Amino acid sequence: MQPRSLALVSATVMLGVIMAIIDSTIVNVALDKIAGNLGASIDEVAWVATGYILSALIVMPLNGWLTATLGRKRFYAICVAIFTIASFLCGTATNIWQLVFYRVIQGFGGGALQPTAQAIMFESFPRDQRGKAMAIFGMAAMAGPAIGPLLGGYLVANYDWPLIFLINIPLGIIAFLMTLAYIEDPPYRVKPEGSFDYIGLGSMVLGLGSLQYVLERGQHDDWFNSPTIVILSITAVGGLVTFIAREIMTRYPLVDLRIFANRSFAAGNVISIVSGFGLFGLSLVLPLFMQTLLGWDAWQTGVALLPGAIATAVSMVVVGRLSSHIDARLLMGAGLIVFGIGSWVMGYLSQDAGYWDIFWPRAAQGFGIGLLFVPLTVVTMSSVPLNQTASASGLLTLVRQLGGSLGIAALTTYLQTDTATVYAGLSSGVNTGRAVVGQTLAQLQALFEQHGYAAAQAHALALAQIAQMTQSDANAIAYENLFRISGVLFFVSLLALLLLANPKVRGGAPAQQVIAAD
């Protein structure tokens, strides 16, 4: 394509991506307001977020089949239309389950926008400019988590929650018209052969849906102490095993899982799980750390997280220029190391941490994600023939999302169990026989007595205050351990780089020969 055409295609798909990703994060800050307005419980309103994620997750692996069947232009336009219409319906919902239903519909459109846009960008740019293409895509993808919470907080505080959905309507209309005008179908698209694989679809929906529910709600429902979690875990294993066996054995698979036989693609997905773990998992844990331990409000938390998003955008611009000159595996290694160092340094944060204590490690994490994301996508996707780009992009996005869900589940579970373990250890050493404890107790008791409490009441309040201080210390230590473990995970994932091939060639053959051979 000519530069002007590339710019128009990029603007078109980036508008859809930003719209979808912002919407997936903006709703989180409005859940309390939605629950109060619609008379819903905390568990009920949680389905506003969970329903969207479940439907988005199911459509991601179908990206290749739907693109091949409907055509890239038509499929992307349909996704934008579904997302926009569902956004309007969400803004008009009058009860919680109506809103959840509309969010599920919205997820079917939004879940396909990101992988489809990524495939369009990857296919449209020349081979030597794909690093630049993925940098542009990455900046749009990272804009959502940065802008969403701030924008959502502002709209909810100053207006009302329906506006977080209704603002999508003008953007969706523009994106739809631009899609019809500027997106084209690739000449190598081939419609799927054979009959529709209903068994594969059914087993995939059961497996992925059950797995995502377990990861989303497992911590809340006390994991395997809940019969629902046990049943859905068994369903997830059975559904996914059936799905994998079916797709490998059938002649015309709904989702071509044979693509994982490609060593570079498989290794790239392993690293993608880790990146999703860090991007989504730590993105949830950090706000909890700031709000529960440091006592910051939502605005202060959003401002503290912003340097990470800015650093990511800067690093993507840098790596977009370097990717055609430096081995992508070196850039990915640097990204893993920088992110790991940022996480490890966070392990030294205390309850007295201020903005600048968090600024630098968070900026390091953001810069590391930018160094990792662009070359990871280029290396993983470059090993795949262009006629399988849409399918590969959908699977890569799915794996990253599952990595994020796994990270959130693992980190929150670890945080809870480690906090209890640390608290038990600390509290065993807190007794009035120790001089420092006795002195602190006496000081607190005297302070409460000065405020008019009787001696017995002051003593009880002082003991409760010491218990609260011990709990706060346990929380801080658990967060420190969690940040360090996350850093170690990124360091260990460096081993997966050994499995990646040189992205410039595959098996010694130029990309054009690979496509022709396939």
Image (tube, rainbow, N blue to C red):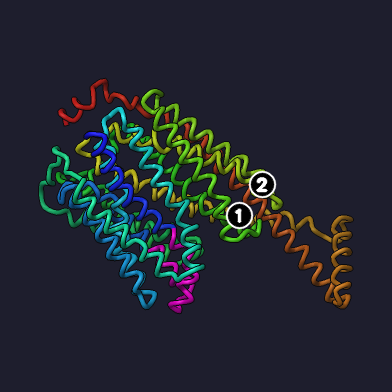
Magenta part of the chain: 26-51
Name the quadrant containing residue 423. Answer: bottom right
Q: Residue at x 22, y 50 (%)?
A: 179
Q: From the viewer's perspective, tell me whether residue 278 is left or right of residue 514.
A: right
Question: In the current view of this chain or complex, which residue is farthest to the left?
Answer: 194
Disc 1 secondary structure class: helix
Is residue 222 visible from the viewing direction of this image?
Answer: yes
Of labels 2 and 1, earlier in sequence is: 1
Rendering coords of residue 102 (x, y %): 32, 68
Question: Residue 95, how many percent across, how many down?
Answer: 38, 77
Looking at the rendered structure, the kind of residue marked 2 is: Leu
Q: Residue at x 84, y 65 (%)?
A: 444
Residues 471 and 294: in front is: 294
- The amino acid pointed to by label 1 is Phe
Q: Main secondary structure of the magenta part?
A: helix
Residue wearing tag 1:
289
Q: Residue furthest front?
A: 4
Answer whether labels 2 and 1 touch (C-beta < 8 Å).
yes
Give the residue displayed 28% in from the left and 35% down from the top. Answer: 261
Considering the image in quadrants, where does the N terminus appear?
top left
Number of numbered callouts drawn: 2
For disc 2, the marked residue is 349
